[in-house]
């Protein structure tokens, strides 16, 4: 998969190579998936409204994948570039503005964050949406849920038998109140998303750098705002003894090898174990807030920055399908690799 375009360019898009041939994706299902990520769906999201309708330019013939490279674009139809005029000389705190300007020079397109924007996850959802449908045809389910927004928590997945889809794929009323409170104070709030994959065979992945954890971490950190990833019991394992953390094997009534617990999160040595794959990602608070903040001028000196424009007071709800998309891309890639 490759991603191209910028937040305020005429279009953004993706290319996807080596996707299985002769698969007929459900376009209504894909559009419903894209809508979960789309902006402008309530007070807890940015006011920017984009339909995020994928336009397929190649790779599909009469509704079926034809084995060629899939290329799809999304038109950007609701940009307000004037909101970013004052940022050309003053970088936003906790954005990529400063290092990108130093790396790419004054030609860097800062509008909407350019290629560093969360807008660039929309084409990732086209690719991931296709992969999700293909995985479902194999009996593999991928689902994510919100386990924290600010100080408000939801129950985590059952590590042995996670329920997909989750009832917590959308923010609860208390979580919406937490977001509204941050917005009222000209601030924003972050959270934690948990993802589960069921139906995996044993042995997907490779040791060392080709492991499923490695490959998932690489694409997950490609999602703007992700600042942490943990698998299974994650950092909590540091406080455990091996006798607590070890997942002991048994044979179930179907003659399948399983484990009593799932602290490993379904991955050992980089390989899938056939237990549910489980991980969590930490999402930082949206850095574009209405409060005045200290910054510097590229032309010299320091000053106070006031950010204009339309921004999410919490990116977590819209990031849930993005995490699912990223996960599906890695899992299907591993399956196709195993087949070959």
Image: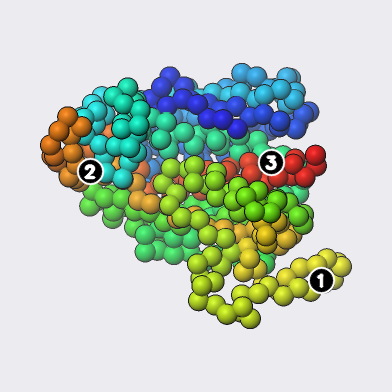
Q: Earlier in the sequence, mark 1 or mark 3?
A: 1
Q: Quadrant of residue 175?
A: bottom left
Crowding at dot 1, Cα within 10 Å, few <14 / some 14-19 / many 20+, comes out as few
Examine the rendered structure and indicate whether residue 233 appears above or below residue 313.
below
Residue 304 image offset from top left, x and y in percent: 14, 41
Q: CA distance from mark 1 to mark 3?
A: 29 Å
Residue that appears at 49% across and 46% down: 221
Residue 252, label in figure: 1
Q: CA distance from mark 2 to mark 1?
A: 55 Å
Instruction: Find out whether the residues at labels 2 and 3 contact each other: C-beta distance under 8 Å.
Output: no
**Residue 111 appears in view:** no
Q: Label 3: which residue?
A: 333
Examine the rendered structure and indicate whether residue 165 appears above or below residue 248.
above
Question: Which numbered disc, 1 or 3, marks the residue closer to the eye?
Answer: 3
Q: CA distance from mark 2 to mark 3?
A: 41 Å
In the drawing, does residue 196 fall left or right of residue 93?
Answer: right
Residue nearest the observer in this picture, 300 or 122? 300
Residue 290, label in figure: 2
**Quadrant of the snapshot with the C terminus:** top right
């Amino acid at each position: 998969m490759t991603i191209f375009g910028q937040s305020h360019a005429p279009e953004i898009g993706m290319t996807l190579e080596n996707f299985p041939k002769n698969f007929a994706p459900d376009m209504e299902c894909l559009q419903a998936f894209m809508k979960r990520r789309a902006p402008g769906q309530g007070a807890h999201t940015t006011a920017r409204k984009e339909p995020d309708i994928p336009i397929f330019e190649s790779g599909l013939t009469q509704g079926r994948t034809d084995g060629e490279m899939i290329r799809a674009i999304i038109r950007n139809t609701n940009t307000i570039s004037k909101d970013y005029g004052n940022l050309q000389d003053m970088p936003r705190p906790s954005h990529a503005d400063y290092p990108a300007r130093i790396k790419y020079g004054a030609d860097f397109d800062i509008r909407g964050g350019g290629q560093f924007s969360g807008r660039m996850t929309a084409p990732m959802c086209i690719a991931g949406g296709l992969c999700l449908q293909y995985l479902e045809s194999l009996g593999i389910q991928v689902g994510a849920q919100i386990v924290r927004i600010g100080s408000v928590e939801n129950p985590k997945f059952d590590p042995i038998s996670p329920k997909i889809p989750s009832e917590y794929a959308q923010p609860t009323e208390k979580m919406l109140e937490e977001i509204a409170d941050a917005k009222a104070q000209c601030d924003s709030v972050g959270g934690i998303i948990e993802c589960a994959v069921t139906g995996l065979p044993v042995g997907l992945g490779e040791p060392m750098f080709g492991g499923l954890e490695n490959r998932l971490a690489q694409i997950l950190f490609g999602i703007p705002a992700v600042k942490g990833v943990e698998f299974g019991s994650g950092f909590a394992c540091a406080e455990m003894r091996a006798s607590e953390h070890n997942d002991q094997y048994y044979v179930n009534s179907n003659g399948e090898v399983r484990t009593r617990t799932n602290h490993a999160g379904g991955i050992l040595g980089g390989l899938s174990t056939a237990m549910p794959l489980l991980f969590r990602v930490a999402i930082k608070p949206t850095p574009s807030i209405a409060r005045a903040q200290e910054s510097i001028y590229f032309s010299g000196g320091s000053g106070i920055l006031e950010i204009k424009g339309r921004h999410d007071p919490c990116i977590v709800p819209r990031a849930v399908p993005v995490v699912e998309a990223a996960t599906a891309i890695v899992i299907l890639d591993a399956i196709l690799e195993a087949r070959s």
